[in-house]
Amino acid sequence: MAVGTADGFEGSVAFGNVLNTTDTDILITAAISHGNSGGPLVDNEGNVVGTNTWGAEGEQYNGAVSLDAMCQKIMKCDGEYYWSRD
């Protein structure tokens, strides 16, 4: 489930399936558009699993960055920890 502000409609929700995953990316069928970028990608249990990032115009798939990859970027920038759960 991709949540965001699709085309200016706040709180828009798009449902879809996961097509594939890598360590950093999640390929989804949820229809996302401008305004969804940066919004959460949520699984069936309500857990945030990624951040909506891009759409492939004219294609049946879109992409998100995995939550694990986002945390790695936030926590490790030039070898220093800027944010930590501890």
Image: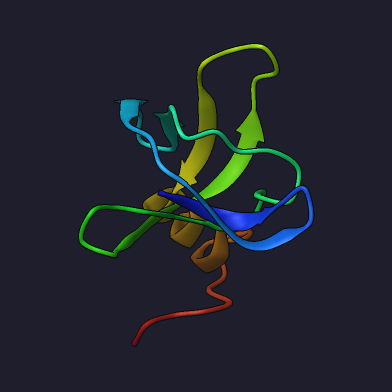
Quadrant where the image shows the C terminus: bottom left
Question: Does residue 17 lie above or below 35 as drawn?
Answer: above
Left or right placement of residue 2 versus residue 7 in this view = left
Place residue 15 in its image quadrant: top left
Left or right placement of residue 11 versus residue 66 in this view = right
* Tally of marks: 0
User: Which residue occupies 45% across, 34% down?
Assistant: 25
Identify the colour scheme used: rainbow
User: Which residue occupies 57% across, 70% down?
Assistant: 80
Is residue 84 or residue 26 the one in the foreground?
26
User: Which residue occupies 46% across, 61% down?
Assistant: 71
Place residue 26 in its image quadrant: top left
Which residue is farthest top? 58
Place residue 27 in its image quadrant: top left
Q: Give percent across and percent down for residue 76.
A: 53, 62
User: Which residue occupies 53% across, 74% down?
Assistant: 81
Question: Does residue 80 lie above or below 53 as drawn?
Answer: below
Left or right placement of residue 54 versus residue 63 in this view = right
Q: Give percent across and percent down for residue 75.
A: 50, 67
